[in-house]
């Protein structure tokens, strides 16, 4: 085979390697021909014109992007650090490439600024107790702003809220005081119920005097069973009244 034939084969192989592209199931290829978008291709085997066409691969898989911790001052002037994670996917590859220079970087920056803005408009108690509401607000705002880029934000989750040490101690004291308050309330309710029961018992004993004597004898039996030492109890004279009665 001549040198010309070998060179032709090499050039043909180079042309085919540059012209034939394989896109995975989750990929789409945005094809630019002389600077203009002509089509979105894939998945599978596609053929482009080398030098004339330029292929940019775009993944359609769900992306989980971590939002770095952001310094936030809440509406009640508490300084906290908040981080989150956002889940999104590319729905329109053409817009994701044409409308924004780098959709991953742009989405990350938008998420950071939105996180600071939304958390800054909320009080600390809202951030801690109504996290689901904060997540929904963040998701709606991000999805609205990324829609022109062909991106769908499906979920946003606030992961961690880092409180200052002084605030953590203050909240711990508040929680301890709340537990003590509940304990006192429960104890007071128990005393109230016990007093009500004692009142009922006193009224019953008043109607049936012999019930008091029976309770007295029962107490004597319990004490004698639990204590080995000698214990002296005064015996009420009421115990002997039935024997002094004349028939």
Image (spheres, rainbow, N blue to C red):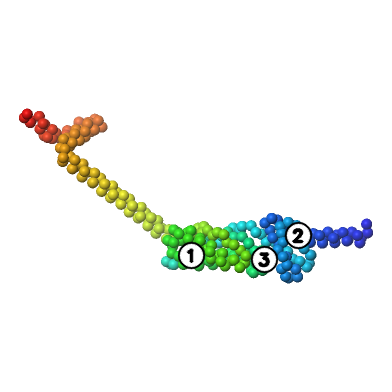
Instruction: Answer few, some or many: residues within 10 Å of disc 3's Cα (few below 14, many 20 plus, some between 14 and 19).
Output: many
Front position in the image: 81 or 110: 110
What is the total number of numbered labels drawn onto the structure image?
Answer: 3
User: Residue at the location (17% across, 39% down)?
Assistant: 205
Q: 226 left or right of 232?
A: right
Q: Do the residues labelled 3 and 2 touch (CB within 8 Å)?
A: no
* Proximity of marks 3 and 1: CB atoms separated by less than 8 Å: no
Mark 3 vs mark 2, CA separation in Å: 17 Å
Q: Which mark is residue 3?
A: none
> In what element is the residue under mark 3?
helix
Q: What element carries label 1?
A: helix
Quadrant of image for the N terminus: bottom right
Residue 227, percent across and down? 24, 32
Calculate the distance from the C-alpha at mark 2 to the C-alpha at mark 1.
47 Å
| Residue under pointer 3 | 94
Task: Please give the residue where the numbered disc 2 appears in the rendered image.
Answer: 46
Q: Is 6 on the left or on the right of 70, as rendered? A: right
Residues at circles 2 and 1 in contact by the CB criterion of under 8 Å: no
- Specify the farthest residue to the left: 246
Query: Disc 2 vs disc 1: which is toward the camera?
Result: 2
Any part of residue 82 in sight: no
The image shows residue 128 at horizontal and vertical percentages of: 45, 59
Disc with the residue nearer the chain's start (3 vs 1):
3
Q: Name the residue under label 1.
A: 119
The residue mark sitting in front, 3 or 1, is 3
Image location (x, y in percent) of residue 68 = 55, 62
Q: Which of 37 and 237 is in front in this view?
A: 37
Is residue 86 placed above or below 214 in the rendered structure? below
What crowding class fits label 1: few (fewer than 14 Cα within 10 Å), some (14-19), or many (20 or more)?
many
Precedes in sequence: disc 3 or disc 2: 2
Q: Residue at image x 59%, y 66%?
A: 147
């Amino acid at each position: 085979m001549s040198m010309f034939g070998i060179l032709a084969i090499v050039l043909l192989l180079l042309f085919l390697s540059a012209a034939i592209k394989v896109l995975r199931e989750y990929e789409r290829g945005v094809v630019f021909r002389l600077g203009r978008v002509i089509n979105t291709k894939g998945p599978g085997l596609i053929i482009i014109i080398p030098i004339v066409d330029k292929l940019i691969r775009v993944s359609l898989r769900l992306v989980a992007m971590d939002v770095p911790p952001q310094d936030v001052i809440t509406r009640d002037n508490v300084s906290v650090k908040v981080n989150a994670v956002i889940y999104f996917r590319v729905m329109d590859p053409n817009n994701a490439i044409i409308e924004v220079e780098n959709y991953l970087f742009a989405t990350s920056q938008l998420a950071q600024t939105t996180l600071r803005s939304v958390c800054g408009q909320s009080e600390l108690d809202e951030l801690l107790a109504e996290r689901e509401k904060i997540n929904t607000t963040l998701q709606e705002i991000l999805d609205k702003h990324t829609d022109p880029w062909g991106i769908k934000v499906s979920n946003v989750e606030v992961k961690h809220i880092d409180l200052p040490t002084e605030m953590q101690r203050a909240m711990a004291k508040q929680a301890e005081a709340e537990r003590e308050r509940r304990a006192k309330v429960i104890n007071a309710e128990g005393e109230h119920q016990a007093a009500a029961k004692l009142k009922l018992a006193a009224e019953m004993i008043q109607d049936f005097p012999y019930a008091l004597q029976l309770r007295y004898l029962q107490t004597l039996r319990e004490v004698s069973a639990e204590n080995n030492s000698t214990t002296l109890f005064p015996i009420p004279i009421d115990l002997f009244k039935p024997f002094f009665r004349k028939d």
